[in-house]
Amino acid sequence: MQEAERNNEDFSEFGFWRTCDAQNLQYYSAVAYYFAENLQHDLGVPVGIVGCNCGGTRACCWMDEASAEKYGAVWMRDYENGLKEIKDLEQAKQAFFNNPMSKKTHPFENEFSDKMMYGVPLEELLQAFADMQEAEIGNAIGPWHEWRPSGLYHTMLEHIMPYTVKGVIWYQGESDEDHPEIYADMMTGLITCWRTAWEDELPFLTTMLAPFGELIGNGGKYYPLLREQQEKVAAQVKDVWCAPTGDVGSDYDIHPKEKKPIGNRLALLAIGHIYQKDILCDAPELKDTCIEGNQIILSFTNAEGGLEVKGEKINALKVYASDVEIPEIAYKVFIEDEHMIIELMEPIHENSISIAFAKEPYYEVNLYNKAMIPIKPFIANI
């Protein structure tokens, strides 16, 4: 919202440090809580978290105008075209401020938000969406909306820039699904923007998009591409790392409720890379493949001590011959140390086999290294 509207809001519940106790815990990001808890336990010093976050937002909301235009011009054009579709700006603005969902200053007074936050059965969640849509509440993204390009950069981020911080944990990306192919550029621009603003090469610990199926026409169709873009940033931008979430998603809830593993994995990345302790902190990643007889052998990095499977078979794995999926009964899969071995019943014709792991919008990974970090998605063409 614009500065004038901000001055009319009651921000008394925000803008100060909170002690981590039973009374204040509900204000904490669960991921940030578990991240800080792990760091404090390992480092033996208090850890402060500055919670600067807003749900449902795109990366362009958190960048200054110059960065948003340079790295995400298509988002700027989308916003400008959306403004043209608003017939009456003043009416749309009033509809926004009359919308209970727009009230961010008292986060626990909105029934719909509570259901989204704490989780309810699918039937109840569907009814909550129906009730919200029936109310015909206007929510056009206009110049007053916090989701406009650069909106949160000015109304939230700039207010914490005086703070000296050690780094950033970043869990975002679902709302960038309309233009997934530029997400790596967007995050590169955002990181550059923040580092310039802080005059510091801040490390970024990012979180891969969790598995998600579909809810009321909103699905994770482009999540596989977005995850690839997230890994691209971690591979190409200095001091950026990405924690996997392949075992904590939800088929129908875009907000998976199992946050502890995510916070733990982000903390491991910090302890290993930022505080430079010699620990296993990265996810297993495909290193190379080879063929021996009718076996395909896949080797992984970050798998010291061997890989572990939770369950009777390895989930999220598909094997293709000439782009046709091979049924599971036609091959066996087993683990030996840091290797995954796929044994086919039929002879292997080189250059005709491909293996896809966790390359769907929703999947359930159950293959880990000794630090209980799940394997990242991959495709291997043999």
Image (spheres, helix red, strand yellow):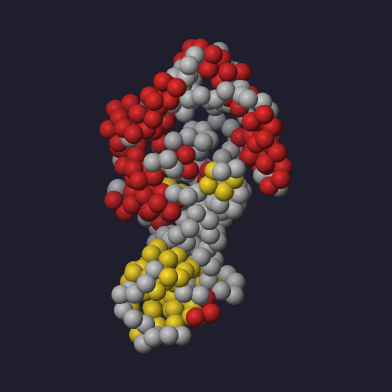
Residue found at x 68% / y 47%: 122
- The percent position of residue 224, horizontal first and vertical second, equals 43, 54
280 shown above or below 349 = above
**Picture quarter containing residue 126?**
top right
Residue found at x 33% / y 52%: 232
- The percent position of residue 127, horizontal first and vertical second, equals 70, 38
- The percent position of residue 198, horizontal first and vertical second, equals 33, 32
- The percent position of residue 241, horizontal first and vertical second, equals 38, 51
**Looking at the rendering, in which quadrant would you find the C terminus?**
bottom left
**Picture quarter containing residue 16?**
top right
In this view of the protein, which residue sits in the foreground, 284 or 341?
341
Residue found at x 47% / y 50%: 221
Work out whether residue 31 can be spotted: no
Work out whether residue 122 can be spotted: yes
In this view of the protein, which residue sits in the foreground, 18 or 293?
293
Residue found at x 36% / y 50%: 229
In this view of the protein, which residue sits in the foreground, 244 or 212?
212
In this view of the protein, which residue sits in the foreground, 262 or 172?
172
Total number of numbered discs in the rendering: 0
